[in-house]
């Protein structure tokens, strides 16, 4: 099963040297298949994104994703871009730049729309209880989504232990995505 590590400013910081060190250590420790640089409040996002892609390149089997910014992902030669659920209109543009596209989804209709528009994968959330993310969908709902589409689906939300990962695995999901699991 694929694993998608998502960064957070609280854990990784926005200090370049510290960020690079922590990111390298966490990738080495967990060996995720996909990693997303996500920091909505860093005024130096582009600079930090550059450091992020450089660190990810040190690992042969790690795919690097930039949050929301198609042009920056292209410029930095990241593997791809992770779009928000408000950016379905950017899928075609990102694909035209030869970027892999992962998009955030929260309903079966959104996952189907992502598939129709050519996204490579979607995150589907929240599966388990997650602070400030609403009512969890649960693994039964996740299994229904996975069985209803052909697009790769990453389970997201409240995945912090091996127990949740094993529950997700039983659904046939492509993988799991998390911030807190990778601390």
Image: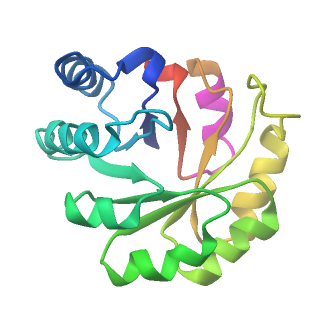
Q: Is residue 48 left or right of residue 57?
A: right
Residue 163 screen position, x and y as percent? 64, 20
For the C terminus, the quadrant is top left
Q: Which residue is drawn at 80% across and 69% down?
A: 109
Q: Residue furthest front?
A: 43
- Residue 162 lies, with reference to residue 108, above or below; the image says above
Q: Residue at x 54, y 20 (%)?
A: 180
Q: Residue at x 45, y 39 (%)?
A: 38
Give 24 or 73, whichever is nearer the viewer. Answer: 73
Give 15 or 144, whichever is nearer the viewer. Answer: 15
**The magenta stretch spans residue 88:** no
Residue 114 screen position, x and y as percent? 63, 72
Within the image, what quadrant is residue 29 found in?
Answer: top left
- Residue 63 lies, with reference to residue 83, above or below; the image says above
Residue 160 screen position, x and y as percent? 59, 20
Q: Is residue 106 left or right of residue 68?
A: right
Give 29 or 55, whichever is nearer the viewer. Answer: 55
What kind of secondary structure does the magenta stretch mostly adopt?
helix
Q: Residue at x 19, y 18 (%)?
A: 21
Residue range of the region highlighted in magenta in the rendering:
164-173
**The magenta stretch spans residue 168:** yes
């Amino acid at each position: 099963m694929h694993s998608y590590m998502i960064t957070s400013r609280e854990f990784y910081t926005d200090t370049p040297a510290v960020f690079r060190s922590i990111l390298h250590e966490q990738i080495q420790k967990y060996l995720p298949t996909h990693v997303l640089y996500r920091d909505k409040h860093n005024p130096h996002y582009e600079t930090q994104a550059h450091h992020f892609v450089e660190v990810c390149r040190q690992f042969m089997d790690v795919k690097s994703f930039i949050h929301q910014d198609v042009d920056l992902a292209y410029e930095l030669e990241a593997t791809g871009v992770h779009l928000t659920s408000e950016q379905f209109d950017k899928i075609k543009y990102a694909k035209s730049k030869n970027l892999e596209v992962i998009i955030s989804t929260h309903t079966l209709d959104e996952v189907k729309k992502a598939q129709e528009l050519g996204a490579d994968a979607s995150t589907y959330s929240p599966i388990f209880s997650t602070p400030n993310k609403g009512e969890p969908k649960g693994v039964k709902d996740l299994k229904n989504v996975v069985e209803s589409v052909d697009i790769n689906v990453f389970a997201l939300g409240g995945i912090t232990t091996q127990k949740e990962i094993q529950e997700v695995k039983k659904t046939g999901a492509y993988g799991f995505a998390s911030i807190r699991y990778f601390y």
